[in-house]
Image (spheres, rainbow, N blue to C red):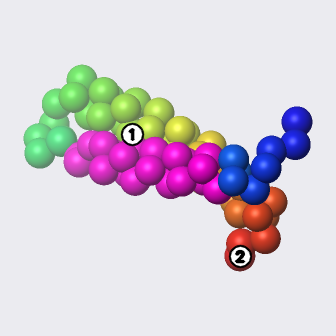
Amino acid sequence: MNQSEEELRERLGQVEESLARLRADLPAPPADAGDFVDSGQYLAQREELEGQIELLENERERLRDSLGLR
């Protein structure tokens, strides 16, 4: 499906907003690293968010390429 430049720019803005929100949501490491349950939950949550960020960064690059932005 061919999207118009306006649609691509709108989607790019949405992707950039989502990236900012996800980066802000990245959890800080637990203060007490001795609690393995908390550490495991922290790592799982962080890995999930980092995966979402990576997908959005790839989409952002594709959109920027389509728009001739580099």
Viewer-proximal residue, 41 or 58?
Answer: 58
Residue 61 percent coordinates (x, y)? 70, 59
Q: Residue at x 22, y 28 (%)?
A: 38
Q: Dot 2 corresponds to which residue?
A: 70
* Left or right: 50 as drawn, with respect to 61: left
Among the two numbered marks 2 and 1 on one chain, the one whose residue lies closer to the N terminus:
1
Give the amino acid at mark 2. Arg
Q: CA distance from mark 2 to mark 1?
A: 29 Å
Q: Looking at the rendering, in which quadrant would you find the N terminus?
A: top right
Element marked by disc 1: helix
Where 41 falls versus 28 (above or below)?
above
* Left or right: 26 as drawn, with respect to 3: left
Mark drawn on residue 46: 1
Q: Residue at x 71, y 72 (%)?
A: 69
Residue 51 percent coordinates (x, y)? 55, 40
Residue 66 percent coordinates (x, y)? 80, 60
* Left or right: 68 as drawn, with respect to 49: right
Residue 60 percent coordinates (x, y)? 64, 55
Where 45 falls versus 31 (above or below)?
above
Give the amino acid at mark 1. Arg
